[in-house]
Image: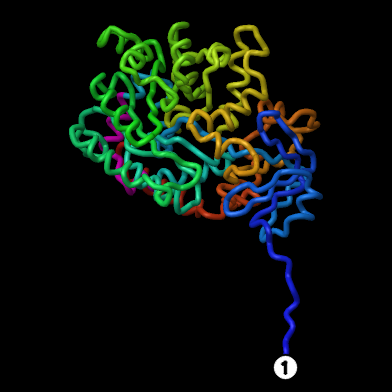
Amino acid sequence: MTVTVPSQRPASADLLIHGGDVLTVDGAGTIVPDGAVAVRDGEIVEVGPAGELRARHSAAETLDASGCLVLPGLVNAHTHLAMTLLRGRADDVTLQGFLERVIRWESELLSPENVATAIRVAIAESVRAGVTSALDMYWFHEAAEQVAREAGWRLHTGPTFMDVPDPADGIAYEDRLAWARRDLAGRTGKEARRPGTRPVLFAHSAYTLSPEQLTGIAALAREFGALLHIHAAENATEVATVEVRYGKRPVELLDSLGLLGPDLLLAHTVDLTGAEIAALARTGTSVAHCPVSNLKLGCGIAPVPRLLSAGVTVGLGTDGAVSSNTLDMLRSLGLAALVHKADGDPTAVGAEQAVRMATIEGARALGLDAQLGSLEAGKRADLIVLDLGGPHLAPRHDPWSTLAYAARAEDVRDTVVDGRILMRGRTLTTLDEGAALAELAALVSRSDLV
């Protein structure tokens, strides 16, 4: 007897997000009303009107985004995620007072296990806030990577250099270059590298590392094609410290050492001269603007309008949860759109510019704008669905303005990374949030440091 099996239309997409307005953040600022995004193998294969994509793609999984805004996931271009462990313990102090406390606590408290515990909570907070990708400078990056991998979240991290007594990881400075070389060697080749990531090295600053150390770290980064990330010119005291020690301001020093360039991303850059801004533009050096942290520590306001006018790529970061108390990138986005108007120019940083800083410009600062930061065919499927149903978002005249001036982290309904749904309907799908919070609470209760 012959059995006839009914033919089935093969699924042409793994995931179809449909029905919402799609803010692509492409070069033209394309908005697709009642649009859709089709995803296959973690990659966006098509963006367009929902009716057309529903007809063309039979998806294994769908997200109905009706009444919502679909946009690229937010890129946190500077953070220290596991500092969630110390949130609230170094408030209302200067940057230098903050560093004195935190560096001591880190050397006494941190371990791979404690970093893993803290970063689970950080990832949960980030996913809830629509952050799909973060550049994380911190100790025990291997533990952080393991947790992020298990959660399906995109983490950009690597070895950190900071020449301080009793480093948290116990690796003597003279052994760190060899350790970092082994780490980078393990990331070479397509098989070892996740799409949408790149190797990264972190050199803390020009006041915790000598010019010779900075030069050596930069040489190693360039050997492996890695991004180099450094704190620079965070406040006037830092600038004065470096100038007294080496006769040059931080950015001047980095320029004189040949470190500025398209593979360097500087965090903060609050205290800059016109000549330094010109040097950043000339060399293609990028900046991560952290307005919440800079204001809270009394560092000042970075000259972002001048940087943008000069053609410098500027992304957005939250900094760590001990200096900003939040990993909410929508808060950073909104503040970036507001704080620069204080000089009297309401156009200094507009809504669209701020949204771009939180998405495509952050990806560009990481050197990953060909893969991340906008909703376009061929890019990785990192996106979020923002529920527009709240009264604080009504009426909805312009999605850029809605995001910059009205949206909140709690409006994020769904978060997708590499085509995998990490949060559906405000429920995390790859992390046990309750267990993560309980582990962090138990760790804090056991410690006499916090």
Q: Which residue is mark 1?
A: 1
Task: Say above or below: 77 vs 239.
Answer: below
Would you say residue 122 is visible in this rendering? no
Place residue 161 in its image quadrant.
top left
Please name whichever residue, 40 or 251, is drawn nearer the observer in this view of the structure: 40
Q: Is residue 229 left or right of residue 340?
A: left
At horizontal 50% and vertical 23% (from top left) the residue drawn is 289
Say what amino acid the circle numbered 1 marks: Met
Task: Say above or below: 443 vs 84.
Answer: below
Q: Which residues are magenta?
A: 100-117
Q: Is residue 115 magenta?
A: yes
Neighbours of disc 1 within 10 Å: few (<14), some (14-19), many (20+): few
Q: Is residue 214 left or right of residue 144?
A: left
Q: Is residue 368 left or right of residue 63?
A: left
Q: Is residue 319 magenta?
A: no
Please name whichever residue, 215 or 102, is drawn nearer the observer in this view of the structure: 215
Q: Assign the magenta stretch its main secondary structure.
A: helix
Q: Which structural element holds mark 1?
A: loop
